[in-house]
Amino acid sequence: MGVWLHGQEPTGDDPLEELRGLATTAGARVAGSLTQRRDKPDIATYLGKGKVEELTELVAAKDADVVIFDNDLTPAQTRNLERAVNTKVLDRTELILDIFATRARTHEARLQVELAQLEYALPRLKRMWTHLSRLKAGIGMRGPGEQQLEEDRRLVTKRIGDLKAKLSRVQARKEREVASRTEMPTVSLVGYTNAGKSTLMNRLTGAGVLVEDKLFATLDTRTRKWDVADFGPVLLSDTVGFIRDLPHHLVASFKATLEEVHQASLLLHVVDVSNPEAEHQMEAVRSILAELGCADRPTLLVLNKADAVSDPSMLDVIRARHGVGIAISAARGWGIEPLEAEIARILGDGMVDAEIEVSAGNGKLLAFLESHADIRSRDYVDSRVALQCRMPQRFLDQIPMDEAAVRVHSHS
């Protein structure tokens, strides 16, 4: 069920296509659909009275087990709709939370999903207790359902507090872990769910990351070493896919997982350009990056699945609107060389070509150069070694001048 309010426009030929994809990912079989345009949502049922009757008839005719809305409903609207249609009603947020719960594999991801689910459920506990009789009586004589509801609220509130404390420790550890990776630049893949990020990760690093044609196939960040041609090694991270109207609870909960995005030297924004909704999906990703405080990160647009675009001029339209975009097919492996070249160019800003002469016995400095520089050649003369290097200026500045002779050739 999809409702478009005043000022909202349904997008694409099938405006409920994404909701169908979400429902299928959650394990549902779609039996039918309805849409409605309204100036504003009905305060009691979100839908108009006539549309509620139409929905009730459709549920009965299809023998449906659940109605899924492409909108966010209040607890009261959900409760009233369930009474009217006589079946379970889920909104978009609840559906996405359910998918995340089934996809969470690591301890960290499970904590994040549980927190988001409990924060969503807390104001809705009353609806969950409607099947218990609540005896109306004087003060101190409340019914068993009312007493249980209060107890549940206390338990849920305490659990939320415990989860937040655990996750803040996880996030602090993650920040230290990511910040300590100073030896290599980090590149993070971001993009709409199912844009092909994991396929690209596998293509570039041979990481063996799970690839499925399903929404939210990846929930946990994976990081692998990747040798970029004409640049050197970087750390490449695959992150959870974004989606429009991603529940705020989830964005907040997954901040630790997305720490790689926060500290990345470069974001690769992977877009499925074969999707008619590509522009809207790009906007959704930008919105979530802004919410995470990452809008100012250097970003390169990667136009994936370009081989499946029916009209190639679409690529030019996207580039005209959004700047440089490298067209690739991660599945087929074409366009990877131009992508690497552009990444090397961007990361190479601030790189320096230099000759560094150092004592052959200075093991500490030689180890530092091995870790932080791309060494092109070595020439040994007596007890000295001259290294032709390419390295970031910030690491060159850390070399003690009394231990080495440094001659900078050029900046690129």
Image (cartoon, helix red, strand yellow):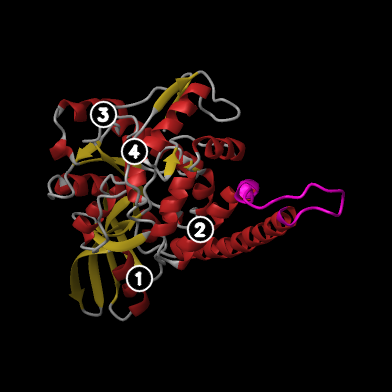
Cα separation between marks 2 and 3: 35 Å
Mark-to-mark CA distance, 4 and 1: 50 Å
Residue at position x 48%, y 53% in the image: 254
Q: Nearer the viewer, mark 4 or mark 1?
A: 4
Asked if disc 4 and disc 1 are in contact, CB closer than 8 Å, the reply is no
Magenta part mainly helix, strand or loop?
loop
Question: Is there CB contact under 8 Å for labels 2 and 3?
Answer: no
- Give the residue pinned by disc 3: 318
C-alpha separation, residue under disc 3 versus residue under disc 4: 22 Å
Q: Residue 384: name its quadrant.
A: bottom left
Magenta stretch: residue 126 in it? yes
- Is residue 375 visible to the viewer in this orientation of the structure? yes
* Residue for point 49% across, 36% down: 85
How far, Cα to Cα, is label 2 from label 4? 24 Å
The location of residue 133, given as percent across then percent down, is: 69, 51
- Please tell me whether mark 3 or mark 4 is closer to you in this view: 4
Give the residue pinned by disc 4: 18
User: What is the three-letter code of the residue carrying label 1?
Assistant: Phe
Which of the two marks, 1 or 3, is nearer to us in this view?
3
Q: Which residue is mark 2?
A: 112
Residue 165 in percent (x, y) is at: 62, 62
